[in-house]
Amino acid sequence: MPVKLVFLGKLADLAGVPEQDVPGPLDWSGLLAALPGPLGAAVRGDKVRLAVNGTLLADKAALAAHDGDEIALLPPVSGG
Amino acid sequence: MTAFSAAHPEAGGIVSFVGKVRPDDEVEALELKHYAPLTLKGMDELADAVLARWPLDGVLLHHRTGTMKPGDPIVLVAAAARHRRDAFEAADFAMDHLKSDAWFWKREKRADGWHWIEPRSQDHADLARWSE
């Protein structure tokens, strides 16, 4: 089972798909390598947060995902 | 609301608020997306915070996702309490938090296509009222 990336909000537009599978294990540099162009630049920005299996990461650079994990890429919320 | 009222027979009153897609000449549709593992957990935590802050019989938070038209209901918040002031304040608090820090992403469709909605400073100002 690969690592599943879930793109929320405008990141899904930049990715062109709502979800993408990448082989694990995956750390922060591996994630950026899998996201070229404007998508990678957006994810690198301070406002985008990551959650692994529903838990927010305090520090994106500490990402350590394994096969079967789900990483959500979260731009700022626009509220309900 | 009938079921909520029936579930809290000891309440002296219920305050409810329905938020709708604000009619706007330029907006044809609104789409709301969520991420269930965070959105639902966040709403559970918000409900717990509301119950901890006011003496309520119950609180109800209901949020739609998907595509909606101007005038469609988006959100329903209700609070049941022995006394009305607690119910009014609890519903107001819940709405301010849903509007500013709940895990929802919104985009609106205008004549030239879809546009993502950025966070509004007014929403953050509304939220700050509760931490004074």
Image (spheres, coloured by chain):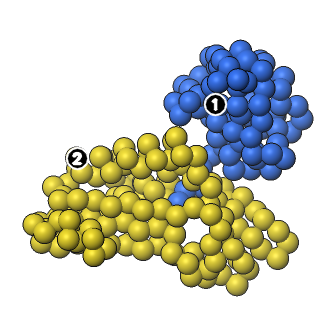
Chain colours: A blue, B yellow
Dividing the image into 4 quarters, which one contains the N terminus of chain B? bottom left
Disc 2: host chain: B
Q: What's the residue at 82%, 76% (across, down)?
A: B111
Measured as percent of width and height from the top left, residue B4 is found at 26, 68
Measured as percent of width and height from the top left, residue B94 is found at 36, 58
Measured as percent of width and height from the top left, residue B118 is found at 66, 56
Camera-nearest residue between B7 and B46 = B7
In this rendering, the answer to whether A27 lies above or below A73 is above
Question: Which residue is under mark 1?
Answer: A70
Q: Secondary structure at mark 2?
A: helix
Residue B25 in view in this figure: yes
Type of residue at label 2?
Answer: Ala
Q: Is residue B80 left or right of residue B96?
A: left
Type of residue at label 1?
Answer: Glu
Q: Secondary structure at mark 1?
A: strand
In this rendering, the answer to whether B16 lies above or below B100 is below
Q: Is residue B51 left or right of residue B112?
A: left
Q: What's the residue at 37%, 47% (across, down)?
A: B44
Do the residues marked 1 and 2 share a common chain? no
Q: Please rate how many residues cluster around mark 2, counting C-alpha atoms within 10 Å: few if below 14, some from 14 to 19, many from 20.
A: few
Camera-nearest residue between A10 and B69 = B69
Question: Which residue is under mark 2?
Answer: B52
Residue B92 in view in this figure: no
